[in-house]
């Protein structure tokens, strides 16, 4: 019988690490290994662990992730596969970008790669909406794009969770208004945009759930299309996808961010008015699901060639439409 692959989660006690652990705990196709809590930041202990396992998931701040990647590289041929949840390697051409729905070839690229970078939460939704429009020649690569977004406070990791739980953080806050948010390089690169987008994120007083919203003036696009035609193009692009769904934008022009919490799902809607020539593309997903830990488990399944459940064992969607 083939050996069960072994996995070490470096940063397993953090927000992303804990959720990955929860998704893998009952999976009989993978064996999780841990370092004693008091040695978890000890480079020697981490290097020894890396030598033993088949794959390491880095759930660490960027600098610590770079340090871990260097430790793995120092093992040469004995280096495990790496899956990095941080921002450190997302536009590094020697790492595969772990967004399986990016192109039809991406799952195979992730499966074959030694090192995979898990995407940023906000770029995941925006890239999946923009790239098919650029590839189809509907949107020019230099089209001026703005991405407006909101995240639950778990997106800021343990320190932001603590600030919200202590009631010392604002109920709602826009940020990134210096226009240098760390997600911009990957958002621009994988959306195939030549013009730097404007990104306006916000965080609010709820734990989990994300919306990315992209307003479009349709007469400024390369080809005249209606909101329904954009919806049809995206629906055809993601037909058959296990996790990404294009959903009719019914209702009263409202959407809340928490309905997919606990799952690895991502929904795309095209709100719009053909007569006005305007549309707003909206992606909804769990920042800790398809935005982080769910995507990581989906990638781990591809990298190890094993079946996985990328959603939590008991997904707890927060609200119905
Ligand atoms: N939260 C989210 O929605 C998302 C997060 N990410 C990324 O995942 C990574 C982890 O984020 P998140 O889980 O939110 O962060 P947290 O702050 O919740 O967790 C980080 C963990 O890393 C540990 N750690 C810090 N430095 C070291 C070190 N030198 N060696 C070993 N362990 C260390 C921390 O331990 P201790 O607490 O003891 O210091 C903590 O357990 C980040 O790079 C983030 O950008 C990616 C997508 C979304
Ligand atoms: C609400 C909040 O602060 N969110 C974080 C993004 C989440 C994160 O740090 O993770 P990834 O870069 O790995 O996606 C931020 O805007 O910096």
Image (cartoon, rainbow, N blue to C red):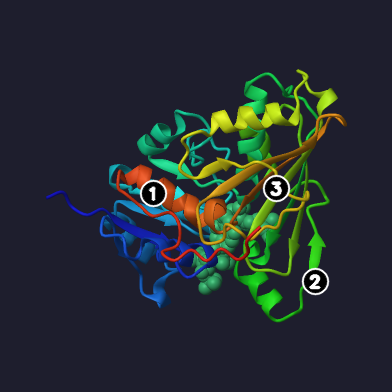
Q: Closer to the camera, 100 or 316? A: 316
Residue 145 visible (yes or no)? yes
Label 1 beta carbon less than 8 Å to ligand 1: no
Question: Residue at position x 26%, y 59% from top?
Answer: 28
- Is residue 55 rendered to the left or right of residue 65? left
Q: Closer to the camera, 86 or 202? A: 202
- Is residue 150 rendered to the left or right of residue 37? right
Mark 2 vs mark 3, foreground winner is 3
Crowd band around label 2 with a 10 angstrom C-alpha radius: few (<14), some (14–19), many (20+): few
Residue 206 rendering spot, x and y as whole percentages: 68, 69
Which image quadrant: the C terminus?
Answer: bottom right
Which residue in the structure is indicated by mark 3? 212
- Residue 227 vertical placement versus 213 (above, below): above
- Residue 167 vertical placement versus 151 (above, below): below
Q: Secondary structure at mark 2?
A: loop
Question: Residue at position x 77%, y 25% from top?
Answer: 142
Label 3 beta carbon less than 8 Å to ligand 2: no
């Amino acid at each position: 019988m083939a050996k069960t692959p072994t996995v070490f989660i470096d940063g397993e006690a953090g927000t992303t690490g804990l959720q990955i652990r929860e998704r893998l705990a009952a999976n009989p196709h993978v064996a999780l290994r841990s370092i004693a809590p008091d040695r978890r930041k000890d480079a020697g202990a981490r290097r020894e662990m890396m030598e033993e396992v088949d794959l390491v998931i880095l759930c660490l701040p960027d600098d610590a992730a770079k340090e871990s990647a260097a430790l793995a590289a120092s093992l040469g041929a004995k280096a495990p596969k790496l899956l990095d949840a941080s921002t450190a390697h997302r536009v590094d051409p020697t790492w595969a970008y772990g967004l399986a729905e990016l192109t039809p070839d991406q799952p195979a690229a992730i499966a074959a790669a030694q090192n995979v970078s898990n995407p940023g939460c906000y770029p995941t939704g925006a890239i999946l909406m923009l790239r098919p429009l650029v590839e189809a020649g509907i949107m020019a690569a230099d089209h001026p794009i703005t991405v407006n977004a909101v995240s639950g406070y778990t997106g800021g990791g343990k320190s932001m969770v603590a600030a919200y739980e202590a009631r010392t953080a604002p109920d709602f806050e826009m940020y990134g208004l210096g226009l240098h948010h760390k997600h911009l390089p990957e958002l621009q690169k994988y959306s195939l945009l030549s013009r730097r987008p404007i990104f306006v994120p916000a965080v609010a007083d709820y734990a989990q759930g994300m919306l990315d919203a992209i307003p479009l003036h349709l007469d400024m696009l390369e080809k005249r299309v209606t909101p329904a035609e954009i919806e049809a193009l995206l629906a055809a692009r993601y037909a058959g996808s296990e996790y990404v769904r294009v959903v009719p934008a019914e209702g009263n022009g409202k959407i809340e961010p928490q309905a997919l919490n606990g799952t690895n799902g991502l929904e795309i809607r095209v709100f719009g008015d053909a007569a006005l020539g305007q549309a707003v593309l909206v992606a909804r997903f769990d920042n800790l699901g398809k935005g982080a830990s769910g995507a990581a488990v989906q990638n781990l399944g591809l990298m190890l060639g094993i079946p996985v459940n990328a959603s939590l064992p008991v997904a707890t969607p927060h609200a119905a439409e």
